[in-house]
Image (tube, helix red, strand yellow):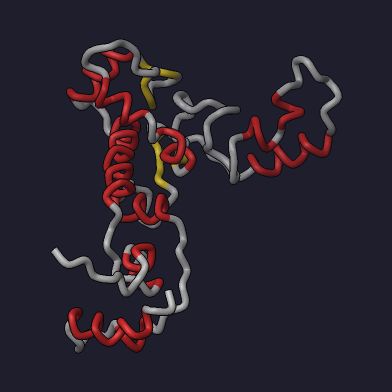
Amino acid sequence: MERKIHLIKWEVVCTQKESGGLGIRKIDLLNRALLGKWIWRFAFEEDIFWKKVVGVKYGQLGFGWRTKEARGTFGVGVWRDILKESSWCWDNIEFKVGKGTKVSFWTDHWCGNEVLSQAFPQLFALAVQRNASLDALGELLHLLRDLRISLEEDAVIWKGEGHGRFRIRDAYKLLSGSNVITFPKKSIWVDKVPTKVAFLLGRPLGRKF
């Protein structure tokens, strides 16, 4: 089979259309987004049979938002792969405080832009280090002044654009990063021009990539 020269870089092809690419997804990033959704589902869904089974099999951490590390040789491969996506998932999850009984004050992200143990490290270590400044305490009290405890159950919220819910599209976009390229997308990707025609028109311009 004759090998043809690629006219446009694969990175450009896989870039979102709004950023000038063709919007084709990379399979490895899409797979990570799909695995990450199970991290979200375990934290978000309640009284679901599969969650109870997984929780019993691996054990739960903290207040049951996540499982312990998957150990063993047999029957743990899938969940172990899912847990590999925990880091970026939980970096994009925060808590909506209801009763406050299932949220860790210091180590869960429920207030401000980061967990309080990182925002106020001196106060976090107060039991050992007793010279934390009053300024830090004042900032903490200022941050907490608008918090209202309610009778609702505590819940998780996705930080993306899905109104608090995990969406594969948002997760994929997060994993792929922001590939900003210079491309006349408004002149090429127009509604009244078929995609194939638009692609052919863009080929000469795509050579510079």
Residue 107 placement (x, y as % from top left) = 56, 28
Nearer-the-camera pick, 106 or 176: 176
Image quadrant occupied by the C terminus: bottom left
Identified at 45% across, 25% down, the residue is: 102
Nearer-the-camera pick, 100 or 110: 110
Relative to 71, say whether 148 is above or below: below
The residue sitting at the front extreme is 2
Image quadrant occupied by the N terminus: bottom left
Residue 123 placement (x, y as % from top left) = 74, 27
Nearer-the-camera pick, 182 or 156: 182
Q: Quadrant of residue 36?
A: top left
The residue sitting at the left extreme is 1
Q: Is residue 11 left or right of residue 108?
A: left
Q: Quadrant of residue 202?
A: bottom left
Identified at 25% across, 19% down, the residue is: 54
Identified at 72% across, 30% down, the residue is: 121
Nearer-the-camera pick, 24 or 158: 24
Residue 81 placement (x, y as % from top left) = 31, 29
Residue 42 placement (x, y as % from top left) = 30, 30
Relative to 173, say whether 53 is above or below: above
Identified at 82% across, 39% down, the residue is: 135
Total labels: the figure holds 0
Relative to 201, say whether 128 is above or below: above
Q: Quadrant of residue 12?
A: bottom left
Q: Is residue 53 left or right of residue 18?
A: left
